[in-house]
Amino acid sequence: MSNQQYDAIVVGSGISGGWAAKELTEKGLKVLLLERGRNIEHIKDYVNANKEPWEFPHRGLMPTQEMLQNYPVLKRDYPLNEEVLDYWVKDKECPYTETKPFSWFRGYHVGGRSLMWGRQSYRWNKWDFEANLKDGYGVDWPIRYDDMASWYSYAEKFAGIQGSLEGLDVLPDGDFMPAMEMNIVEKDVAAKIKKHYNNERHMFIGRSANITQAHHDRTNCQYRNRCWRGCPFGGYFSTQSATLPAAMKTGNLTLRPFSIVTQVLYDKNTKKATGVEVLDATDNKTYEFNAKIVFLCASAFNSTWVLMNSAHDVWADGLGSSSGELGHNVMDHHFRCGANGQAEGFSDTYQYGRRPTGIYVPRFRNIYNDKRDYLRGFGYQGGAGRGRGADIAEFTIGADLKDSLSVPSDHWGMGVMAFGEVLPYHENKISLNKNVKDKWGLPVLDMDVEIKDNEKKMRIDMMNDAAEMLEAAGLKNVNTYDYGYEFGMGIHEMGTARMGRDPKTSVLNGNNQVWDAPNVFVTDGACMTSASCVNPSLTYMALTARAAEFAVSELKKGNL
């Protein structure tokens, strides 16, 4: 590559990296976007986007013995799926070690997990940014909701978030597109819950990054619910559909796939980064690229891996490790428990299309006057539906099967699953395991994390409260479940390079700058100081846009 000098380098092309590339290029910077995996072009490379179940060798859903063998991590939960298998990392090529169990589901390609994410998009509330300070876990966030509100709006307006305005402090409204509609059973259940709990619990349509109106050369959602295969309409937000086209349009972006960033290059004299070192995944050659600023957006653990693998001659544990917090305070959202039941009295109704979102019940524990024997709280996602075909074994083959599939099932079902906050425990950590190397000869990460009594107590309420609400709404045959949770299954890994107010107790300041190298910014999940209980991606978008605005301003002032 002839030009190896840029204004900015962005490492990683997922949700955060795509946003960084868009913001920095639109502000006039020449940007190099580095992605360790292959390129995936919008529309052209969505090879399974229009396939029907019968067009997959094994109907799309059933993992084969070969898949189970080749994907020992992915098989632990739902991501092992024929429809999107090529989007997930091959476990054996990119190993890691587990002092304690951790399910790490990764997407190494242009767009990262923005192609496969669940698209649920929620603002944090004011209490989320204050929780650490008030209950003494972790460190205080260096920012508050008021610092983020305008950036949430900015991100929502560009990404396109559908949702309803509810006027709740616990889940602030945003700048939404017209909301998708709940079905008849969900509306009934929502009304009954609201009445039963005296307007203290709420159920409404899940806010998601699916557009309901044409938006920035993207076509509105077609209700196919095949989002994670890649949408040829651009109906949901991804790097490919939204931020990358915007960045490319400026003429200021250079995209380089197959580029594994091995370290941030650091100048001891200036105490700043000078660029990055890259291992080309195709020819195994090493390259250096220089820039005035570096944005690490490689996903929470990989951004921290890069820091850990950098500046060892200054800090034994890597760039950003001077506080002793680099790699610590791993968080996720624990889930896989809730309840389901049957709704009676709606035999003459059915649902429309394949809506790509469900319902949401915001947190109601440990807020206002509620006090539990654990800290923080949880929310619910779920939905109601009516399948097809009779639930009779004799009707599962031949002509009887075909006939049964032409009529709705006998009843509507509804289920809700809880997502709970994990506290930022210092002892939950990742570290470099230099005794184990990947296929490129690079040290791998070791995972040493677990949930504790606080989360275990919370899970009891997560399950029982779900059943109580469904029963209060009149559902029958209500069953609870707890399928168990292993760290990482939420695919919301956070922490390891947290923001804070003091360089002695945090890795980043309130502008996402590494204390030890102020021209290095980390804006993905690594930066999170606490986890809340809502999906985090919208917060990454807002934090990235905010940090980019600050970085460019500081560049212009000559401070970086």
Image (cartoon, rainbow, N blue to C red):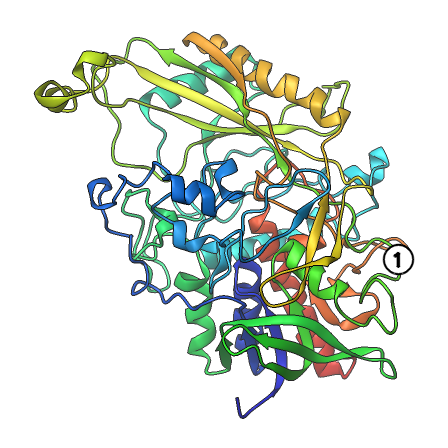
Q: Residues within 10 Å of mark 1 (few under 14, many from 20)?
A: some
Out of 196 and 93, give the one closest to the viewer: 93
Q: Residue furthest right?
A: 504
Q: Can residue 118 be seen from the camera position used here?
A: no
Identify the residue at horizontal 34%, vertical 46% (top origin).
83
Q: Is residue 511 left or right of residue 153?
A: right
Residue 463 location (% of width, % of height): 58, 18
**Total label count?**
1
Residue 545 location (% of width, % of height): 60, 63
Q: Is residue 95 above or below residue 188?
A: below
Q: Is residue 138 left or right of residue 464?
A: right
Identified by mark 1, the residue type is Ser
Residue 66 falls in image quadrant: top left
Q: Residue furthest bottom?
A: 2
Q: Can residue 166 be seen from the camera position used here?
A: yes
Residue 452 location (% of width, % of height): 75, 29
Quarter of the figure that contains the C terminus: bottom right
Residue 485 falls in image quadrant: top right
Residue 429 location (% of width, % of height): 76, 46
Q: Is residue 139 above or below residue 292?
A: above
Helix, strand or loop at disc 1?
loop
Identify the residue at horizontal 49%, vertical 25% (top origin).
203
Identify the residue at horizontal 23%, vertical 19% (top origin).
349
Q: Residue furthest left?
A: 399
Out of 397 and 343, give the one closest to the viewer: 397
Out of 549 and 238, give the one closest to the viewer: 238
Residue 127 falls in image quadrant: top right
Identify the residue at horizontal 47%, vertical 13% (top origin).
470
Q: Is residue 258 left or right of residue 9?
A: left
Q: Is residue 334 above or below residue 222?
A: above
Residue matched to label 1: 323
Out of 19 and 171, give the one closest to the viewer: 19
